[in-house]
Image: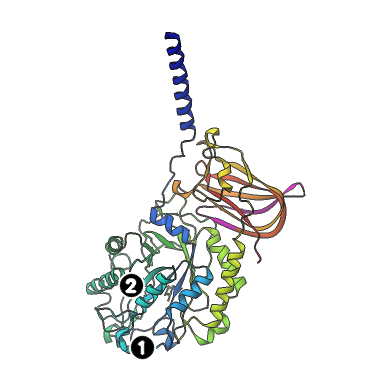
Amino acid sequence: MRRFLSCLLFVLVCWASWSSALAQATKPPAPFGALPTKQHLAWHELEFYGFIHFTTNTFTDREWGLGDESPQLFNPTQLDADQWARVAKAAGMKGLILTAKHHDGFCLWPSRYTEHSVKNSPWKNGRGDVVRELSEACRRHGLKFGVYLSPWDRNHPEYARPAYITYYRNQLRELLTGYGEVFEVWFDGANGGSGYYGGARETRRIDRRSYYDWPTTWKLVRELQPNCIRFSDAGPDIRWVGNERGYGYDPNWATYNTEGRWPGVSVKESLWHGDRGGSHWVPAEVDVSIRPGWFWHASQNSKVKTVEKLLEIYYASVGRGCNLLLNIPPDRRGLIHEIDAQRLTEFGRVLRATFQNDLARGKKVRASNVRGRGSQLGPQLLTDGDRNTYWAADDNVREAEIEIDLGGPTTFNVVRIQEYIPLGQRVEAFQIDARVDGSWQRIAEGQTIGPRRVLRFDRVTATALRIQLTKCLACPTLSAVEVYNSPM
Ligand code: FUL
């Protein structure tokens, strides 16, 4: 009996130490550097959404209103926010952000704090509210809704004085409490100085660093809309990419040094590339218009971007780990013009066709290193169709190689990869090869990956795919490798 018991004890001790070794072996890597919040993680998944620039400018043919426009000018004849939402959906957008107030100060909702709004417009006899119409249309169509409230206000008499900040925050409060969930607020850095300012018609300069007291305003947004993402040159949640042409950069670090940066005050290189090892997670958003201008102008009906151009923008923005904010301005009827609608629908069709069939799904994967040699964070998780499971390497690893056996000749021209960003951004150089007729051929290379890279290259027919991570800040993690054959 005693012998039996000591045998049993021995077996139990062995089992316990073996299972604890295994548990240790598959312990996830420690987080590295600045990390995304849960709001960031949800935002990264949106990838692509739209901007609606619409105000008196649409009727005066301007890009920047002066602030002295009569509200009587705003008179769309067939405004239909459901049509905007339908077009956005067809394009594959996940939400729409509306210019509730642009630099001219005209408000698209009947604000209690000013007469300079839709309530003094002929549209719907002054009883209209574009913010209401679009927020409700978005909800009906399963789109997120966001707002742009221009800090610069060329109409307001108190602009550049303390009273305007109270006005600005009052307006923000109206927008963030009266229209349901707001997924993003856009804080623009532009300030041209001159304006109407209640009739003063003068140039007013402000100190971009201190005048707006941004930390207080950002806190207000967090309080009123806990899930809302705050955009500006300085974050605090996401940053401007530093150009309005539709391009993200490589490298593109989601990490960014926020110290000393404010809306309208930043460093170009940091906006473009982020800051390697930066203090906060502040990823880039790419804003660009489908037309040369942000507002609709009849003269630009022939200059709507082509589907090819939109695809180029998609791969240079979403493809480089940014989110894409594509502006689609309504015309004087209050409709997205037929040409824009047709391009966007076709663009959406191509995107859907591109990503409908992942040719790597379920395929066999081998990695040069697997964390703890275990299977819990193994490379098979890269092709399991779940972007939340991930492969990780051992702590001391800085270079690794992944090989996917495509199981026979496979034709493709797009590869989509992503890091497991809840643990931080790590990769700083990678190369992708395809095995064509038995030998490896370089098809793509880059620096950062982060939330995603979507790389498009000349179509190849290959039997295997190899990803080499050649430089990493810490042991690498990847959560997905997908392979597609795009029609365009
Ligand atoms: C800029 C503004 O000055 C433009 O008019 C436009 O709204 C763009 C999205 O942001 O800073």
Q: Which residues are magenta?
A: 438-454
User: Residue 364's x, y, as percent?
Assistant: 64, 44
Direction from residue 51 to residue 347 in the image, left or right: right
Ligand 1 placement by image quarter: bottom left
Q: Amino acid at mark 1?
A: Trp
**Residue 477 visible here:** yes
Task: Using the image as rendered, state which of residue 205 and residue 388 is in the foreground.
Answer: 388
Q: Residue at x 58, y 83 (%)?
A: 302
Q: How much space separates mark 1 and mark 2, taking CA atoms?
A: 25 Å
Which residue is found at the position 54% from the left and 82% from the top?
338
- Using a 10 Å C-alpha cutoff, classify the residue at mark 1 as few (fewer than 14 neighbours), some (14 to 19) or many (20 or more): many
Q: Is residue 334 left or right of residue 311?
A: left
Circle 2 sits on which residue? 151
Of the numbered discs 1 and 2, the one sitting upstream in the chain is: 1
Describe the element under mark 2 as helix, strand or loop: loop
Classify residue 138 by image quadrant.
Answer: bottom left
Res 123 label: 1
Where is residue 454? Give x, y as percent: 58, 58
Marks 1 and 2 in Cβ contact (< 8 Å): no
Whether 30 is drawn above or below 201: the answer is above
Describe residue 481's horizontal placement relative to residue 161 as left or right.
Answer: right
Residue 69 visible, this angle: no
Q: Where in the figure is residue 403, as x and y percent of width and height?
A: 64, 44
Disc 1: residue Cβ within 8 A of ligand 1's nearest atom: no
Q: Is residue 285 rendered magenta in the image?
A: no
Give the class, few, some or many, for how many residues have Cα within 10 Å of label 2's Cα (few <14, many ≥20): many
Given this view, does label 1 or label 2 mark the residue nearer the observer? 1
Q: Which secondary structure lies at badge 1?
A: helix
Residue type at mark 2 is Pro
Foreground pick, 468 / 4: 4
Model colouring = rainbow
Which image quadrant: the N terminus?
Answer: top left
